[in-house]
Image: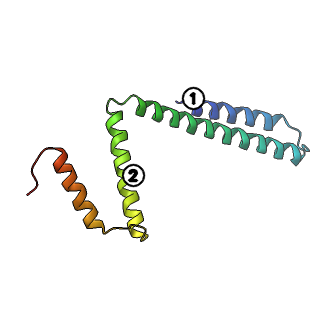
Amino acid sequence: MSQTEHDQTAHQGEQERQHQERPAGAGSAAASLELLTLLAAGVADLALDQLRQTADRAQDALRRADLRELLTDGVVELRKRGELATRRAGMADENYLETMARRAAEQIASEGRPCA
């Protein structure tokens, strides 16, 4: 049983005990206040749990051995998406195919291979 389930079971037992001890004429204001308090505690617990999970995922990502390659790939992908977005919006000054052909030729030249 997880800590959260254990806490919930203990809390339910406490609520039942308190409900039995209350006089029949206990006001709805106390019940409403208790409900609001429990809801607020539940929301806070949920938020903290999500924050813990996010922090664990971030730590796992930072421990990756290929983090540099992952970031490089991300930057390349974002640049390509930006190029496509500007082309789609009509903001590109040149023809897309001409730009890609020029880049391919530059890459081949930088690798020292002759262009055909």
Circle 2 residue: 78
Q: Give percent across and percent down for residue 6.
A: 59, 30
Say if 79 sits above or below 111 in the image.
below
Residue drawn at x 16%, y 50% as measured from the top left: 108
* Mark sitting earlier along the chain (2/1): 1
Q: Residue at x 40, y 58 (%)?
A: 82
* Residue type at the position of mark 1: Gln
Crowding around mark 1 (Cα neighbors within 10 Å: few <14, some 14 to 19, many 20+) is: few
Q: Residue at x 38, y 68 (%)?
A: 93
Q: Position of residue 14 (x, y in %)?
A: 73, 32
Quadrant of the rendered image containing residue 63: top left
Percent x, y of residue 17:
76, 33
Is 82 situated left or right of 13 in this image? left
Kind of residue at disc 2: Leu
Residue 67: x %, y % from top left: 36, 34
Identify the residue under disc 1: 3
Estimate how packed mark 2 is, as few (under 14), some (14 to 19) or many (20 or more) residues with alpha carbons within 10 Å. few
Closer to the camera, 105 or 11? 105
The CA distance from mark 2 to mark 1 is 41 Å
Q: Is residue 62 above or below residue 37?
A: above
Single out the mark in the foreground, 2 or 1.
2
Q: Residue at x 89, y 39 (%)?
A: 23
Of 14 and 44, nearer the camera is 44
Count of number-bearing discs: 2
Disc 1, SS: helix
**In the structure shown, which secondary structural element does the residue marked by tag 2 occupy?**
helix
